[in-house]
Image: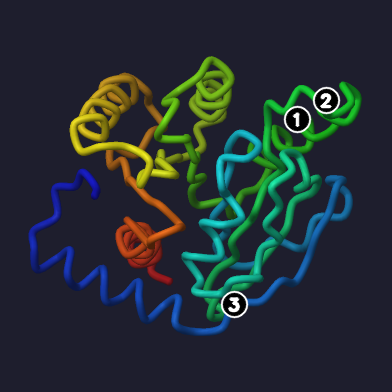
Amino acid sequence: MSVTDDTDDDKAGLVEAGRLLFAGSADFYAATQTLDRLPPMEGIEIAFAGRSNVGKSSLINALTGRNTLARVSHTPGRTQQLNFFKVADRMSLVDMPGYGYAAVEKAKVEAWTELIHSYLKGRANLARVFVLIDARHGLKSIDTDVLDGLDKAAVSYQVVLTKGDALKKAQVEARMAGIQAALAKRPAAFPEVILTSSRDDLGVADLRAAVARLLAERGV
């Protein structure tokens, strides 16, 4: 379920382009906890950010159709570095450390936060950040802090709701409307909001289509 101005024919074409894109290869190729060890900037990068335990790794696996590409853990805070995955030799997906998990040592949280902010501000080939929000809880203050930072840095981002299977239709509609209203005044926010669930592949085709559209706009 998504919000978009595309015609039915446009959307069908993007869905197919997305399917073909993610039917190709997808491989891990780099990881770092420090800026000085970032891989060279080659091609387009698309990053995934969100609170710890929001389901980033599960969604990346669903997106690429590979159950073990990104490491999934039921323990919040396990992703402690930037993980890079090459998709079809056309772009890179970046799995970022989750933010907001208070049980992790304060110094470690501060180090992750600095790594995230520095990467987002300094990566010239970063085309978009998908900010994952738990559909059950909506935008929290820690999420809006991240959105504020992306707006300030003029980094394009798009909100993706995860765990959408946990809500009833009326709840989904209310949540989507509320987030759309919150994003309307944000300069770096992409207007389309995508509802997903990695458990039943809800919205995965829409997310693939959004990536395909982004690549097409960039001429990749």
Q: Are marks 2 and 1 in contact (CB under 8 Å)?
A: yes
Q: Can residue 214 be seen at all in this image of the molecule?
A: no
Query: Which image quadrant is residue 99 in?
Result: top right
The residue identified by callout 1 is 113
At label 1, counting other C-alpha atoms closer than 10 Å, the crowd grade (few under 14, some 14-19, many 20 or more) is some
* 94 to 148, vertically: above or below: below
- Along the line of sight, the residue nearer the viewer: 220 or 76: 76
- Element under disc 3: strand
Dot 1 or dot 3: first in sequence order is 3
Alpha-carbon span between mark 2 and mark 3: 31 Å
Dot 2 or dot 3: first in sequence order is 3
Residue 26, numbered circle: 3
**Amino acid at dot 1:** Thr
- Measuring from the top left, give residue 119's x and y in whole percent: 71, 42
Residue depicted at x 38% and y 33%? 189
At label 3, counting other C-alpha atoms closer than 10 Å, the crowd grade (few under 14, some 14-19, many 20 or more) is many
- Measuring from the top left, give residue 69's x and y in whole percent: 65, 70
Query: Which image quadrant is residue 149 in?
Result: top right
The residue identified by callout 2 is 110
Q: Seen from this angle, which residue lies furthest top?
A: 141
Alpha-carbon span between mark 2 and mark 1: 5 Å
Residue depicted at x 79% and y 49%? 81
Alpha-carbon span between mark 1 and mark 3: 27 Å
Residue depicted at x 59% and y 77%? 26
- Along the line of sight, the residue nearer the viewer: 30 or 136: 136
- Element under disc 1: helix
**Amino acid at dot 3:** Ala
**Amino acid at dot 2:** Glu
* 182 to 88, vertically: above or below: above
- Along the line of sight, the residue nearer the viewer: 48 or 43: 48
